[in-house]
Image (spheres, rainbow, N blue to C red):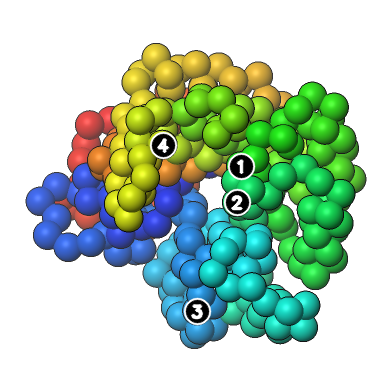
Amino acid sequence: MYTIGLTSWSEHRSLIKNIDHPLTLQEYSAFFPTVELDTFFYGIPRVTSVAAWLTKVPSDFKFVIKANRSFTLHPGEELTKDELSKKINAFKEAISPLIEQNALKTILCQFPPYFDATAKNVAYLKYLIKELAGLPLSFEFRNRSWFNSQIFNSLITFCTQNKITLVAVDEPSIGRLSVPFKPVITNKQLLLIRLHGRNKAGWQHIGPDWRKYRTLYDYSDEELNRLKDTLFSLQNSVQEICIIFNNNSGGHAAQNALSLKKMLNVQFHNLNKKPPEQLDFF
């Protein structure tokens, strides 16, 4: 089974003609059956806010939730072990409506570029798995050391044994500052593929507006067709392949996602009713 989604729901105005407001979750879920959210990365929302999301989407809609930045050792909030444990418990409480309604696809743990393949960091992964036991987890590594051949084979074994989805990332190839695209099945339930675009100059842009440049990319039909072939080669090895488009800054993600949907010849059922001014390119 293939599912396709975008990061966030509000940015994708290109889905609806003449729209004069940020897309609502209800409008977004007329087009895609899943969404990735970084809300939890920056802070823990109220459980009532999370429960409210579920009133806007169909019963089959699923959320990919990015783990809080403190869980993945991003800078800015260094916590003691007790403080981290309390925050993890608050996180679990906040996502409880998603769990109760079977609306949580996975928790995306995106580790920072300096989180390299060391014994200390492997020990931390084991700690995090224990703290989040029973929850569906996906690990995304952004340090190239995890992809050295011998270490990568051990990583595959580690993720498989712990039923962790190893995220396959498509991003610009710029040597040690990037990671390769390695779609490998480590969890028979889910393969998560995240597409950031291939804007080399934008990926290396430094400044407060880096995000605007980093994800500025429009996948060509040729590139999407090559991705389709890769997906076809994996489809019989896993229950679900979820593809998330994160090339948002130029407004390309939604149309790239719809193009891939057409190439894969898939239909998403139990979506919300489309607005009358939807695009009908396909």
Q: Distance between the residues labelled 3 and 4?
A: 30 Å
Quadrant in which the N terminus appears: top right
Residue that badge 4 annotates: 203
User: In the shown orientation, is residue 76 left or right of residue 139?
Assistant: left
Residue that badge 1 annotates: 142
The residue depicted at 36 percent of the width and 63 percent of the height is 25
* Residue sitting at the far front: 206
Tell me the amino acid under the disc marked 3.
Answer: Pro
Residue that badge 2 annotates: 112
For marks 4 and 2 on the same chain, the one whose residue lies earlier in the sequence = 2
Tell me the amino acid under the disc marked 2.
Answer: Pro
Label annotation for residue 45: 3
Q: Distance between the residues labelled 3 and 1?
A: 26 Å
Q: How far apart are marks 4 and 1 (CA)?
A: 13 Å
Whether label 3 touches label 1, CB < 8 Å: no
Residue 44 at x, y percent in the picture:
54, 77
Residue 11 seen anywhere in this rendered image of the structure:
yes
The residue depicted at 54 percent of the width and 83 percent of the height is 47
Quadrant in which the C terminus appears: top left
For marks 2 and 3 on the same chain, the one whose residue lies earlier in the sequence = 3
